[in-house]
Amino acid sequence: MFNRFRSMPATAIAAVLGCALMTTAPLPAAAKEKPKKETKGTSISASKGFTPSVKKMMDATTAKDAAALQAALTEGQGTASTTEDRYWLAYYQLQLGILNKDQSLQRQGLDTMLDSGITPPESLAAYNFFAGNFAYGAKDYPKAVQRLEAARAAGSTEPQLGLLLMDSYLNAGQVDQGVATAKATIEAARAAGQQPSDELYVRPIKALQAAKRDAEANEMLALRLRDYSAPEVWRQTLFVLLQQPGMTKDVTLDTLRLMRASKAMLQRAEYLEYTALATEAALPGEVVSLIKEGRASKVIPTPDANFDEAFKAQKDRIGDEESTLAAYAQKPSTLSNPKVAGATGDAMVGYGRYAEAIPLYKAALNGGDKDLWTYRLGVAQALSGDTASAQASFAQVAGSRKPLANLWLIKLGNGAAPAAAPATGD
Protein backbone atom coordinates (compact mmCIF):
# COMPACT_ATOMS: atom_id res chain seq x y z
CA MET A 1 0.00 0.00 0.00
CA PHE A 2 2.85 2.39 0.75
CA ASN A 3 5.65 3.53 -1.53
CA ARG A 4 9.00 5.07 -0.67
CA PHE A 5 9.11 8.78 -1.44
CA ARG A 6 12.76 8.86 -2.50
CA SER A 7 12.41 8.38 -6.26
CA MET A 8 15.01 10.94 -7.37
CA PRO A 9 17.82 9.42 -9.53
CA ALA A 10 21.32 9.57 -8.15
CA THR A 11 22.47 11.97 -10.86
CA ALA A 12 19.92 14.54 -9.70
CA ILE A 13 20.54 14.36 -5.95
CA ALA A 14 22.74 17.44 -5.89
CA ALA A 15 19.92 19.52 -7.33
CA VAL A 16 18.02 19.11 -4.06
CA LEU A 17 20.32 21.61 -2.39
CA GLY A 18 20.03 24.29 -5.05
CA CYS A 19 22.76 26.79 -5.84
CA ALA A 20 22.67 30.32 -7.21
CA LEU A 21 25.12 31.32 -9.93
CA MET A 22 27.88 33.76 -9.09
CA THR A 23 28.63 36.59 -11.49
CA THR A 24 31.83 38.42 -12.26
CA ALA A 25 31.96 41.77 -10.51
CA PRO A 26 33.04 44.82 -12.55
CA LEU A 27 36.14 46.79 -11.75
CA PRO A 28 35.57 50.12 -10.02
CA ALA A 29 35.76 53.03 -12.44
CA ALA A 30 38.38 54.84 -10.37
CA ALA A 31 41.90 53.48 -10.08
CA LYS A 32 44.74 54.53 -7.81
CA GLU A 33 47.67 54.88 -10.17
CA LYS A 34 48.74 58.11 -11.73
CA PRO A 35 51.80 58.45 -13.96
CA LYS A 36 55.13 59.10 -12.22
CA LYS A 37 53.74 59.24 -8.67
CA GLU A 38 51.99 56.28 -7.00
CA THR A 39 50.17 56.66 -3.68
CA LYS A 40 52.16 56.05 -0.51
CA GLY A 41 55.29 57.24 -2.30
CA THR A 42 55.59 54.43 -4.85
CA SER A 43 57.10 55.78 -8.07
CA ILE A 44 56.55 54.37 -11.56
CA SER A 45 58.24 56.81 -13.94
CA ALA A 46 57.61 56.85 -17.66
CA SER A 47 60.58 57.26 -20.01
CA LYS A 48 61.19 60.66 -21.63
CA GLY A 49 60.12 59.50 -25.07
CA PHE A 50 56.92 57.93 -23.72
CA THR A 51 55.84 60.89 -21.55
CA PRO A 52 53.84 62.77 -24.28
CA SER A 53 51.85 59.61 -25.05
CA VAL A 54 51.11 58.81 -21.43
CA LYS A 55 49.90 62.37 -20.84
CA LYS A 56 47.43 62.00 -23.72
CA MET A 57 46.23 58.73 -22.17
CA MET A 58 45.75 60.39 -18.80
CA ASP A 59 43.85 63.33 -20.29
CA ALA A 60 41.61 61.05 -22.37
CA THR A 61 40.82 58.92 -19.32
CA THR A 62 39.96 61.99 -17.27
CA ALA A 63 37.66 63.17 -20.05
CA LYS A 64 36.22 59.65 -20.41
CA ASP A 65 36.96 59.87 -24.14
CA ALA A 66 37.35 56.27 -25.28
CA ALA A 67 38.24 57.19 -28.87
CA ALA A 68 41.01 59.57 -27.77
CA LEU A 69 42.30 56.98 -25.31
CA GLN A 70 42.44 54.33 -28.04
CA ALA A 71 44.40 56.72 -30.27
CA ALA A 72 46.83 57.55 -27.45
CA LEU A 73 47.35 53.85 -26.72
CA THR A 74 48.13 53.16 -30.38
CA GLU A 75 50.63 56.02 -30.38
CA GLY A 76 52.13 54.82 -27.09
CA GLN A 77 52.80 51.35 -28.40
CA GLY A 78 55.37 52.90 -30.74
CA THR A 79 57.11 54.95 -28.03
CA ALA A 80 57.11 52.57 -25.03
CA SER A 81 60.65 51.37 -24.37
CA THR A 82 60.83 50.36 -20.68
CA THR A 83 59.02 48.02 -18.28
CA GLU A 84 57.51 51.10 -16.67
CA ASP A 85 56.24 52.36 -20.03
CA ARG A 86 54.62 49.01 -20.77
CA TYR A 87 53.08 49.03 -17.28
CA TRP A 88 51.34 52.33 -18.12
CA LEU A 89 50.21 51.01 -21.48
CA ALA A 90 48.57 48.12 -19.65
CA TYR A 91 47.11 50.46 -17.05
CA TYR A 92 45.43 52.61 -19.69
CA GLN A 93 44.36 49.52 -21.58
CA LEU A 94 42.54 48.64 -18.35
CA GLN A 95 40.96 52.11 -18.30
CA LEU A 96 39.82 51.70 -21.91
CA GLY A 97 38.27 48.37 -20.97
CA ILE A 98 36.42 50.08 -18.12
CA LEU A 99 35.14 52.86 -20.40
CA ASN A 100 34.00 50.37 -23.04
CA LYS A 101 32.80 47.77 -20.50
CA ASP A 102 35.08 45.27 -22.20
CA GLN A 103 36.02 42.67 -19.60
CA SER A 104 38.45 40.90 -21.93
CA LEU A 105 40.43 44.13 -22.31
CA GLN A 106 40.29 44.76 -18.58
CA ARG A 107 41.57 41.27 -17.84
CA GLN A 108 44.42 41.64 -20.35
CA GLY A 109 45.46 44.97 -18.86
CA LEU A 110 45.42 43.65 -15.30
CA ASP A 111 47.39 40.52 -16.19
CA THR A 112 50.07 42.56 -17.98
CA MET A 113 50.38 44.95 -15.03
CA LEU A 114 50.67 42.14 -12.50
CA ASP A 115 53.10 40.12 -14.64
CA SER A 116 55.36 43.17 -14.95
CA GLY A 117 56.54 42.69 -11.40
CA ILE A 118 56.37 46.41 -10.61
CA THR A 119 52.74 46.76 -9.49
CA PRO A 120 52.75 48.95 -6.36
CA PRO A 121 52.34 46.85 -3.19
CA GLU A 122 49.28 48.83 -2.13
CA SER A 123 47.53 47.87 -5.39
CA LEU A 124 48.34 44.16 -5.38
CA ALA A 125 45.33 43.11 -3.31
CA ALA A 126 42.78 44.89 -5.48
CA TYR A 127 44.36 44.08 -8.84
CA ASN A 128 44.90 40.41 -8.06
CA PHE A 129 41.33 40.10 -6.80
CA PHE A 130 39.84 41.57 -9.96
CA ALA A 131 42.22 39.60 -12.19
CA GLY A 132 41.16 36.45 -10.35
CA ASN A 133 37.55 37.49 -10.68
CA PHE A 134 37.88 37.85 -14.45
CA ALA A 135 39.73 34.52 -14.73
CA TYR A 136 36.90 32.90 -12.78
CA GLY A 137 34.33 34.41 -15.14
CA ALA A 138 36.31 33.04 -18.08
CA LYS A 139 36.42 29.60 -16.40
CA ASP A 140 40.20 29.73 -16.25
CA TYR A 141 40.17 28.25 -12.76
CA PRO A 142 43.91 27.55 -12.28
CA LYS A 143 44.62 31.20 -13.15
CA ALA A 144 41.79 32.31 -10.86
CA VAL A 145 43.34 30.34 -7.99
CA GLN A 146 46.74 31.93 -8.63
CA ARG A 147 45.39 35.48 -8.67
CA LEU A 148 42.96 35.07 -5.78
CA GLU A 149 45.59 33.45 -3.57
CA ALA A 150 47.88 36.39 -4.36
CA ALA A 151 45.05 38.78 -3.45
CA ARG A 152 44.57 37.00 -0.15
CA ALA A 153 48.29 37.11 0.56
CA ALA A 154 48.29 40.84 -0.16
CA GLY A 155 45.55 41.39 2.42
CA SER A 156 42.44 41.72 0.24
CA THR A 157 39.26 42.30 2.22
CA GLU A 158 36.87 41.78 -0.71
CA PRO A 159 33.77 39.98 0.64
CA GLN A 160 33.61 37.60 -2.35
CA LEU A 161 37.25 36.53 -2.19
CA GLY A 162 36.80 33.36 -0.15
CA LEU A 163 33.77 32.28 -2.15
CA LEU A 164 35.47 32.77 -5.52
CA LEU A 165 38.67 31.10 -4.35
CA MET A 166 36.78 28.13 -2.94
CA ASP A 167 34.82 27.62 -6.15
CA SER A 168 37.91 28.06 -8.31
CA TYR A 169 39.62 25.26 -6.39
CA LEU A 170 36.55 23.03 -6.70
CA ASN A 171 36.20 23.66 -10.42
CA ALA A 172 39.91 23.00 -10.88
CA GLY A 173 39.41 19.58 -9.29
CA GLN A 174 41.23 20.51 -6.08
CA VAL A 175 38.49 19.42 -3.70
CA ASP A 176 40.58 19.35 -0.52
CA GLN A 177 41.77 22.92 -1.03
CA GLY A 178 38.26 24.04 -1.92
CA VAL A 179 36.74 22.50 1.21
CA ALA A 180 39.52 23.91 3.41
CA THR A 181 39.01 27.39 1.92
CA ALA A 182 35.25 27.13 2.47
CA LYS A 183 35.67 26.15 6.12
CA ALA A 184 38.18 28.93 6.79
CA THR A 185 35.94 31.51 5.12
CA ILE A 186 32.90 30.26 7.05
CA GLU A 187 34.65 30.50 10.40
CA ALA A 188 36.05 33.95 9.59
CA ALA A 189 32.55 35.20 8.76
CA ARG A 190 31.09 33.71 11.92
CA ALA A 191 33.89 35.21 14.02
CA ALA A 192 33.02 38.60 12.52
CA GLY A 193 29.37 38.16 13.46
CA GLN A 194 28.27 37.63 9.86
CA GLN A 195 26.24 34.86 8.26
CA PRO A 196 28.40 32.95 5.77
CA SER A 197 27.13 32.63 2.22
CA ASP A 198 25.08 29.46 1.74
CA GLU A 199 27.21 28.66 -1.29
CA LEU A 200 30.20 28.14 1.00
CA TYR A 201 28.34 25.04 2.16
CA VAL A 202 26.39 23.96 -0.91
CA ARG A 203 29.22 23.92 -3.44
CA PRO A 204 31.63 21.84 -1.30
CA ILE A 205 28.78 19.45 -0.45
CA LYS A 206 28.12 18.88 -4.14
CA ALA A 207 31.82 18.37 -4.87
CA LEU A 208 32.17 15.88 -2.00
CA GLN A 209 29.08 14.01 -3.14
CA ALA A 210 30.47 13.79 -6.67
CA ALA A 211 33.72 12.39 -5.23
CA LYS A 212 31.69 9.86 -3.19
CA ARG A 213 33.09 11.29 0.04
CA ASP A 214 29.80 10.99 1.90
CA ALA A 215 31.19 11.28 5.44
CA GLU A 216 32.76 14.66 4.65
CA ALA A 217 29.64 15.78 2.80
CA ASN A 218 27.61 14.91 5.88
CA GLU A 219 29.92 17.02 8.01
CA MET A 220 29.37 20.03 5.75
CA LEU A 221 25.62 19.39 5.77
CA ALA A 222 25.65 19.54 9.55
CA LEU A 223 27.75 22.71 9.59
CA ARG A 224 25.32 24.34 7.18
CA LEU A 225 22.47 23.87 9.65
CA ARG A 226 24.23 26.09 12.20
CA ASP A 227 23.57 29.06 9.92
CA TYR A 228 20.63 27.87 7.83
CA SER A 229 18.18 26.03 10.06
CA ALA A 230 14.85 26.58 8.32
CA PRO A 231 12.62 23.47 8.00
CA GLU A 232 13.26 23.32 4.25
CA VAL A 233 17.03 23.13 4.86
CA TRP A 234 16.51 20.36 7.40
CA ARG A 235 14.45 18.52 4.82
CA GLN A 236 17.13 18.95 2.15
CA THR A 237 19.80 17.69 4.55
CA LEU A 238 17.90 14.62 5.67
CA PHE A 239 16.78 13.88 2.12
CA VAL A 240 20.45 13.75 1.08
CA LEU A 241 21.21 11.34 3.93
CA LEU A 242 18.35 9.10 2.83
CA GLN A 243 19.97 8.72 -0.61
CA GLN A 244 23.23 7.37 0.75
CA PRO A 245 24.10 3.66 0.54
CA GLY A 246 23.52 1.36 3.49
CA MET A 247 20.29 3.07 4.58
CA THR A 248 18.40 0.29 6.39
CA LYS A 249 14.71 0.50 7.31
CA ASP A 250 15.65 1.03 10.94
CA VAL A 251 17.97 3.97 10.18
CA THR A 252 15.47 5.34 7.67
CA LEU A 253 12.83 5.41 10.40
CA ASP A 254 15.17 7.31 12.73
CA THR A 255 15.96 9.75 9.91
CA LEU A 256 12.29 10.43 9.30
CA ARG A 257 11.77 10.90 13.03
CA LEU A 258 14.42 13.62 13.01
CA MET A 259 12.73 15.18 10.00
CA ARG A 260 9.55 15.26 12.06
CA ALA A 261 11.27 16.66 15.15
CA SER A 262 12.74 19.42 12.95
CA LYS A 263 9.26 20.28 11.63
CA ALA A 264 10.66 19.48 8.20
CA MET A 265 8.06 16.98 6.97
CA LEU A 266 6.64 19.18 4.25
CA GLN A 267 5.26 16.69 1.73
CA ARG A 268 2.70 13.91 1.81
CA ALA A 269 5.15 11.29 0.53
CA GLU A 270 7.36 11.65 3.62
CA TYR A 271 4.40 10.95 5.90
CA LEU A 272 3.50 7.99 3.72
CA GLU A 273 6.87 6.28 4.09
CA TYR A 274 7.11 7.11 7.79
CA THR A 275 3.63 5.62 8.32
CA ALA A 276 4.62 2.44 6.49
CA LEU A 277 7.83 1.97 8.49
CA ALA A 278 6.23 2.69 11.87
CA THR A 279 3.37 0.32 11.04
CA GLU A 280 5.86 -2.40 10.14
CA ALA A 281 7.71 -1.75 13.42
CA ALA A 282 4.45 -2.31 15.36
CA LEU A 283 4.25 1.23 16.74
CA PRO A 284 0.55 2.12 16.49
CA GLY A 285 0.80 5.07 18.87
CA GLU A 286 3.48 6.67 16.68
CA VAL A 287 1.48 6.07 13.50
CA VAL A 288 -1.68 7.64 14.91
CA SER A 289 0.09 10.72 16.31
CA LEU A 290 2.02 11.12 13.04
CA ILE A 291 -1.10 11.09 10.88
CA LYS A 292 -2.88 13.49 13.23
CA GLU A 293 0.07 15.85 12.92
CA GLY A 294 0.08 15.60 9.13
CA ARG A 295 -3.61 16.34 8.98
CA ALA A 296 -3.27 19.31 11.32
CA SER A 297 -0.53 20.79 9.15
CA LYS A 298 -2.65 20.20 6.01
CA VAL A 299 0.15 18.15 4.42
CA ILE A 300 -2.09 15.10 4.59
CA PRO A 301 -5.37 15.92 2.84
CA THR A 302 -8.76 14.93 4.19
CA PRO A 303 -10.01 12.56 3.02
CA ASP A 304 -7.05 10.43 1.93
CA ALA A 305 -7.73 6.73 1.41
CA ASN A 306 -4.26 5.47 2.34
CA PHE A 307 -3.95 7.48 5.52
CA ASP A 308 -7.58 7.05 6.53
CA GLU A 309 -7.20 3.27 6.34
CA ALA A 310 -3.91 3.29 8.24
CA PHE A 311 -5.25 5.62 10.91
CA LYS A 312 -8.31 3.46 11.57
CA ALA A 313 -6.32 0.21 11.68
CA GLN A 314 -3.69 1.57 14.05
CA LYS A 315 -6.25 3.39 16.22
CA ASP A 316 -8.15 0.14 16.64
CA ARG A 317 -4.92 -1.64 17.47
CA ILE A 318 -3.99 0.76 20.23
CA GLY A 319 -6.79 -0.17 22.60
CA ASP A 320 -5.40 0.14 26.12
CA GLU A 321 -1.80 -0.42 24.97
CA GLU A 322 -0.50 2.90 26.30
CA SER A 323 -1.66 2.33 29.90
CA THR A 324 -0.60 -1.33 29.77
CA LEU A 325 2.85 -0.37 28.53
CA ALA A 326 3.27 2.27 31.23
CA ALA A 327 2.84 -0.42 33.90
CA TYR A 328 4.86 -2.99 31.97
CA ALA A 329 7.77 -0.56 31.53
CA GLN A 330 8.41 -0.43 35.27
CA LYS A 331 8.57 -4.18 35.87
CA PRO A 332 11.98 -5.63 36.81
CA SER A 333 11.45 -8.35 34.21
CA THR A 334 11.20 -5.70 31.49
CA LEU A 335 14.26 -3.76 32.62
CA SER A 336 16.33 -6.92 32.99
CA ASN A 337 15.78 -7.95 29.36
CA PRO A 338 17.67 -5.49 27.10
CA LYS A 339 15.80 -6.44 23.94
CA VAL A 340 12.38 -6.11 25.55
CA ALA A 341 13.41 -2.90 27.31
CA GLY A 342 14.48 -1.32 24.03
CA ALA A 343 11.29 -2.28 22.21
CA THR A 344 9.21 -0.97 25.11
CA GLY A 345 11.17 2.28 25.06
CA ASP A 346 10.38 2.66 21.34
CA ALA A 347 6.69 2.19 22.03
CA MET A 348 6.74 4.73 24.86
CA VAL A 349 8.42 7.30 22.60
CA GLY A 350 5.69 6.64 20.07
CA TYR A 351 3.17 7.74 22.67
CA GLY A 352 5.18 10.86 23.49
CA ARG A 353 6.22 9.52 26.92
CA TYR A 354 9.87 10.42 26.48
CA ALA A 355 10.99 10.61 30.11
CA GLU A 356 9.57 7.14 30.79
CA ALA A 357 11.51 5.75 27.83
CA ILE A 358 14.87 6.89 29.20
CA PRO A 359 15.37 4.12 31.83
CA LEU A 360 14.22 1.57 29.28
CA TYR A 361 16.85 2.66 26.77
CA LYS A 362 19.50 2.66 29.49
CA ALA A 363 18.51 -0.93 30.26
CA ALA A 364 18.73 -1.79 26.55
CA LEU A 365 22.37 -0.66 26.58
CA ASN A 366 23.19 -3.82 28.55
CA GLY A 367 22.47 -5.86 25.44
CA GLY A 368 23.82 -5.51 21.92
CA ASP A 369 23.84 -2.63 19.38
CA LYS A 370 25.15 0.05 21.69
CA ASP A 371 24.99 2.73 18.99
CA LEU A 372 21.29 2.11 18.32
CA TRP A 373 20.24 2.38 21.95
CA THR A 374 22.62 5.23 22.78
CA TYR A 375 21.18 7.18 19.85
CA ARG A 376 17.58 6.53 20.84
CA LEU A 377 18.40 7.35 24.45
CA GLY A 378 19.71 10.70 23.25
CA VAL A 379 16.51 11.32 21.28
CA ALA A 380 14.33 10.55 24.32
CA GLN A 381 16.48 12.82 26.48
CA ALA A 382 16.30 15.63 23.91
CA LEU A 383 12.54 15.35 23.51
CA SER A 384 12.05 15.26 27.27
CA GLY A 385 14.01 18.53 27.61
CA ASP A 386 17.23 17.13 29.11
CA THR A 387 19.56 18.82 26.63
CA ALA A 388 22.84 18.24 28.49
CA SER A 389 22.27 14.49 28.83
CA ALA A 390 21.13 14.26 25.21
CA GLN A 391 24.30 15.98 24.02
CA ALA A 392 26.44 13.58 26.06
CA SER A 393 24.61 10.59 24.56
CA PHE A 394 24.78 11.80 20.96
CA ALA A 395 28.52 12.47 21.33
CA GLN A 396 29.05 8.73 21.96
CA VAL A 397 27.20 7.49 18.87
CA ALA A 398 29.20 5.91 16.06
CA GLY A 399 28.31 3.79 13.05
CA SER A 400 25.37 4.38 10.72
CA ARG A 401 23.60 6.77 13.10
CA LYS A 402 26.56 9.06 13.66
CA PRO A 403 25.42 11.55 10.96
CA LEU A 404 22.01 11.72 12.64
CA ALA A 405 23.60 12.17 16.07
CA ASN A 406 25.71 15.01 14.69
CA LEU A 407 22.60 16.69 13.33
CA TRP A 408 20.91 16.39 16.71
CA LEU A 409 23.96 18.03 18.29
CA ILE A 410 23.66 20.91 15.84
CA LYS A 411 19.94 21.19 16.57
CA LEU A 412 20.46 21.24 20.33
CA GLY A 413 23.42 23.60 20.00
CA ASN A 414 21.25 26.02 18.03
CA GLY A 415 18.86 26.11 20.95
CA ALA A 416 16.00 24.80 18.82
CA ALA A 417 13.26 23.11 20.81
CA PRO A 418 12.41 19.71 19.27
CA ALA A 419 8.83 19.22 18.20
CA ALA A 420 6.92 17.00 20.62
CA ALA A 421 4.46 14.44 19.30
CA PRO A 422 0.78 15.22 19.82
CA ALA A 423 -1.43 12.96 21.87
CA THR A 424 -2.96 9.95 20.13
CA GLY A 425 -6.58 10.62 21.01
CA ASP A 426 -9.23 11.72 18.51
Image (cartoon, grey):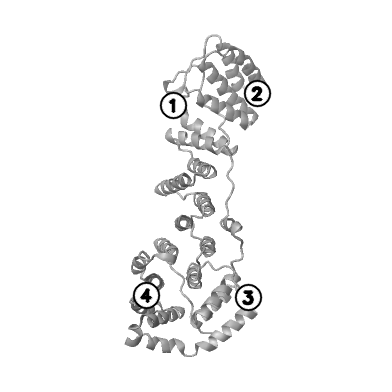
The mark nearer the N terminus, 3 or 4, is: 3
From this viewpoint, is residue 87 visible? yes
Q: Amino acid at mark 1?
A: Pro
The mark nearer the N terminus, 1 or 4, is: 1
Q: Which residue is mark 1?
A: 121
Q: Position of residue 70 (x, y in %)?
A: 65, 20
Q: Amino acid at mark 4?
A: Gly
Q: Which residue is mark 4?
A: 368
**What is the quadrant of the N terminus in the image?**
bottom right
Residue drawn at point x = 56 percent, y = 22 percent? 90
Residue 216's tag is: none
Cα separation between marks 2 and 1 = 28 Å
Residue 301's tag is: 3
Whether pointer 2 and pointer 4 mark residues with C-beta atoms closer than 8 Å, the reply is no
Cα separation between marks 1 and 4 = 65 Å
* Label 1: how many Cα within 10 Å (few below 14, some 14–19, many 20+): few
Residue drawn at point x = 66 percent, y = 17 percent? 71
367 or 348, nearer to the observer: 367
Q: Which residue is mark 2?
A: 66
Q: Which of the two discs, 1 and 4, sits closer to the camera?
A: 4
Q: Amino acid at mark 3?
A: Pro
Q: Which of the two discs, 2 and 1, sits closer to the camera?
A: 1
* Label 4: how many Cα within 10 Å (few below 14, some 14–19, many 20+): few
Q: Position of residue 252 (x, y in %)?
A: 50, 70
